[in-house]
Image (tube, helix red, strand yellow):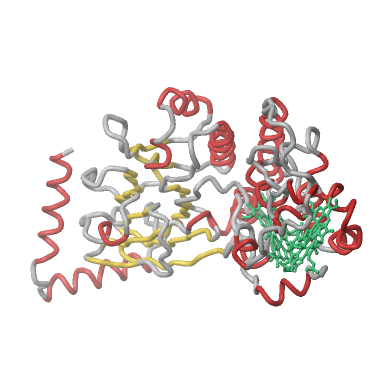
Amino acid sequence: MNNIGNDGNKRRNDNKHPMTLAVVFARAFLLLLLLSAPSYGQVRELNIIYTGSLQGQLEPCGCSPKTDFGGVARISGYLTEHERSLSPYILLDAGNFSDKDTAQGRLKIKAMLKSFSLMRYNALALMGRESSFDRDFLCSLQGKYNVPVVSGFKDAEHSLTLRQDSLNINVSAHPEGIKAEMLNILLTELPLDEARLIKGWDLIITSSGEELEEPVRTDGTVLVSGYPKGKKLGILTVKTNGQRMVDFTHRWVSIGKELEEDERARDVLNDYDKEVARLIAEAEKPETGTTYAGVAKCSGCHQPFEESWKKTAHAKAVATLESAGKSADPECLICHTVGYGEEGGFFSIETTPELKNVQCEACHGLDMEHLTDFSRPMQPVTERVCLKCHTESNSPDFDYPLYLEKIKHW
Ligand code: HEC
Ligand code: HEC
Ligand code: HEC
Ligand code: HEC
């Protein structure tokens, strides 16, 4: 490793020599040659398509059109549709594509790897998020899904070489892994501030999760950052001299709803939804006795309020999940039902149908004593109560007075 690192240093020092006129002419000549001789037998232009920091987002929740971006089926659809105009290209992921090592997190990372494999990623990096998974489990996946991996972990394979026509591309997850006579690409999770200081690479792609609208170029190294949660796909079109990068342009493709999904990737996502549903179905509902009363009980004394509530979006929140195929996904139920994850709250449509949707107690709180002593006031409903669910990413248009007006039942 060290030798290779030193080699990188040497190259960097060479660059510091003042340019002589001869060098300037030689470079100009080379450039001319590059421009005028496309059949030189070497790759002239290559698209490096990249993601990083997908954070386990297989697809966006669709809670708001303003945040409805990302999703592997859309990315795959885009690549399939534009395969020809994008070619030749390599497809890289800089890591942090998974969520956490939970039962659902494992289903997610599997679906993610299946999707990467479908899209024929040329390399993906294992970074911090991936390192939180059980190592044996992770290894078992690597064998199963056919995706070349470079690893940011200690004592693992850090690099691989891709060939694109006559161009050799070194993809590495090790900051000192530069190789001679290759196009060198570093996949890292270092924050931009630190990644900026690494020298000698042609390209550094980070999965730090920071948004970087335009690539940063320092000393011949181009630095980009995978757009968080895959809401945009990065495309770097590089010109090479057959070895190193000499020029580039960059653009983002917004992964919006208008992109047609790849059906095969959609199947992967649908399978994932089914497996998530199985997790809930197999889980034992804890014996707690009922704690949430449910709208039917409130309605016993507050019937007009129920009538009014029924007309709001809150009363159809689970139907919304049903039409998205997500009515058994804990990550959605948490905001689309009452008391999910709490003792005596919503558990599943089968076991607690009476607690479907965003019911009275999601706002008024849990107070069984009110049912017998209704002079007991319920908790005051403030904006804070709404913000539990109406977050910046799920409800970017949330405006308290305006939204309050829409649910008025008092
Ligand atoms: C943090 C809370 C939260 C989570 C988690 C959440 N939602 Fe939502 N969802 C909301 C809120 C709040 C709205 C209403 C947004 C608005 O109109 O301002 C909403 C709206 C929606 C809508 C649009 C409904 C319509 O009629 O326009 C869909 C679809 C949806 N959610 C699906 C999902 C799915 C699928 C998941 C899980 C992957 C999910 N939500 C997870 C809070 C959440
Ligand atoms: C047995 C009848 C009964 C049931 C069941 C009942 N309430 Fe009430 N509730 C009342 C009465 C009567 C009042 C009016 C009390 C007053 O004005 O002093 C009231 C008042 C309220 C108020 C406004 C007063 C305040 O200070 O908070 C809210 C909110 C409320 N109930 C919510 C609920 C919810 C939510 C449920 C279901 C979990 C529920 N109630 C179930 C009878 C009932
Ligand atoms: C337990 C989570 C939760 C809480 C708490 C909550 N909401 Fe919602 N809200 C949702 C969800 C989920 C939706 C989307 C339902 C759907 O369309 O499927 C929604 C939708 C809405 C909508 C409809 C938006 C539209 O334009 O169609 C309004 C208005 C709204 N909420 C207002 C409020 C207000 C005001 C509060 C607080 C007083 C509040 N909500 C508290 C989860 C919540
Ligand atoms: C999205 C949040 C939300 C949901 C869901 C909701 N409420 Fe309310 N409710 C409020 C707010 C906000 C107020 C007015 C502020 C206050 O009085 O605390 C209110 C007021 C009330 C009042 C007091 C009326 C008065 O005259 O003071 C009653 C009673 C009530 N709601 C009953 C219900 C019942 C019954 C349900 C279910 C069918 C329900 N609410 C669902 C937010 C909600």
Residue 395's image quarter? bottom right
Relative image position of residue 406 (x, y in whole percent): 78, 72
Quadrant assignment for ligand 3: bottom right
**Towards the viewer: 255 or 335:** 335
Q: Residue at x 78, y 68 (%)?
A: 407
Quarter of the picture holding the C terminus? bottom right
Quarter of the picture holding the N terminus? top left
| 277 lies above or below 53 | above
Relative image position of residue 130 (x, y in whole percent): 42, 38
Relative image position of residue 392 (x, y in whole percent): 57, 65
| 235 lies above or below 136 | below
Q: Residue at x 31, y 60 (%)?
A: 192
Number of numbered discs present? 0
Q: Is residue 146 left or right of residue 247?
A: right
Q: Is residue 398 left or right of residue 294?
A: left
Q: Residue at x 90, y 51 (%)?
A: 300
Q: Is residue 91 left or right of residue 391?
A: left
| 17 lies above or below 289 | below
**Towards the viewer: 283 or 227:** 283
Residue 363's image quarter? bottom right
**Towards the viewer: 147 or 266:** 266
Relative image position of residue 29 (x, y in whole percent): 25, 70
Q: Residue at x 35, y 37 (%)?
A: 151
